[in-house]
Image (cartoon, helix red, strand yellow):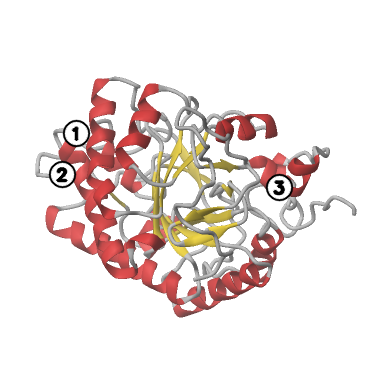
Amino acid sequence: MHGIPVARGGLEGTALFPHERTPMSLFAPTTVGEIGVRNRVSLAPMTRLRAGADGVPGPIVAKYYAQRAGIGLLVTEGVFPSDESRAYPGQPGIVTDAQAAGWAKVADAVHAEGGTVFMQLMNGGRVTHPEITGTDRIVAPSAIAIEGDTRLADGTKVAYAVPHALETAELATVRDEFVAAARKAVDAGFDGVELHGANGYLLHEFLSPASNQRTDEYGGSPAARARFVIEVAQAVVAEVGATRVGIRISPAHNIQDVWETDDAETRATYEALVSGLAPLGLAYLSVLHADPAGDLIQDLRRTFGGTFIINSGFSSVTTRDEAVSVVEKDLADLVAVGRPAIANPDLVTRWEKGADENEVDQASVYGGDEHGYTDYPFLQA
């Protein structure tokens, strides 16, 4: 496996006396699964939409991730594992041989720079439209459409479609699409995969009673709503190994009509989920939440018991001081960073030096060419 050698279970973070603890450093190496990574910063998976209509990631995608290889753990934008799971025009896939070949070049480029990269696997669920997927249907736990519009490749806005409610027997097919995609990603040279269970996409849709109103064994209670996500994780682990599999969740993150409040029902759902994931020995659990120090998040961390990544910057930008503090206070093992890593390919170097940062050009975040993607300047030597 790629990455730098880091001893597991060493003396890092321990002290001569039991009541003392040496604070962790954001810039110290650690392990993710069985891979040594050079620091505790992670590139948050962010939609960038630079693939063509064929879903093939091209040379600029390889360049983009290779530029950011100084970040300890890179996680790609969401990659669709089946045609009907494609959420957006310009989103890359891992279905065809051509797509897999494109991703192999991305992995090679990152590894040539000494980096570590996981591919995020994302079934968009109902967050799409048949005119985007090119399929007869889109799918979800229940036949409940998102209110509002989505945008087609030509810029036209259309109302979200009512999704097909997956029948119980169909869930195995969706699960196996994740498995096949994980195998393709690892065979293409990726160090691992991340299951996207956040931000209102299919796996998150199963977790929320707002989008999951099923009456079979996959809905109706916290444990039942968590069941499909756990089964997907189990199947992917069986295919590529637990140390190559992470998962991202976003408890109480109300987005794309997946409504959850920080209440007993949400807590019970995510406790059931993480309790089911913990025995698998996953590479990591990544959580998007505004309050990393809160009881819900820290309780989930204790339940999981493994490498824990926090991303608190969805609605606000994660700053250097916040990232340093999160690790020093032992609120997480790594910090996932979004917009600052878009604008600063050498973000870790800038943070280590206390240097100024480039500002992100929000207008060029989604889609387009190299502008706002690979043309941000590096810090001069």
Q: Residue at x 52, y 37 (%)?
A: 16
Residue identifier under label 2: 218
- CB of mark 3 within 8 Å of CB of mark 2? no
Front residue of 348 and 376: 348
Residue identifier under label 1: 222
Image position, residue 218 (x, y; %): 15, 44
Q: Residue 64 bears which disc, if any?
A: none
User: Left or right: 220 with respect to 23?
Assistant: left
Q: Residue furthest right?
A: 381
Q: Residues within 10 Å of mark 2 (few under 14, many from 20)?
A: many
CA distance separating discs 2 and 1: 9 Å
Q: Can the viewer see residue 164?
A: no
Q: Residues within 10 Å of mark 1 (few under 14, many from 20)?
A: many
Front residue of 84 and 40: 40
Image position, residue 307 (x, y; %): 43, 47
Front residue of 156 and 75: 75
User: Left or right: 257 with respect to 271?
Assistant: right
Q: Residues within 10 Å of mark 3 (few under 14, many from 20)?
A: many
CA distance separating discs 3 and 1: 39 Å
Front residue of 99 and 331: 331
User: Left or right: 161 with respect to 164?
Assistant: right
Q: Residue 348 bears which disc, if any?
A: 3
Q: Return the disc, 3 or 1, that comes first in the chain's sequence.
A: 1
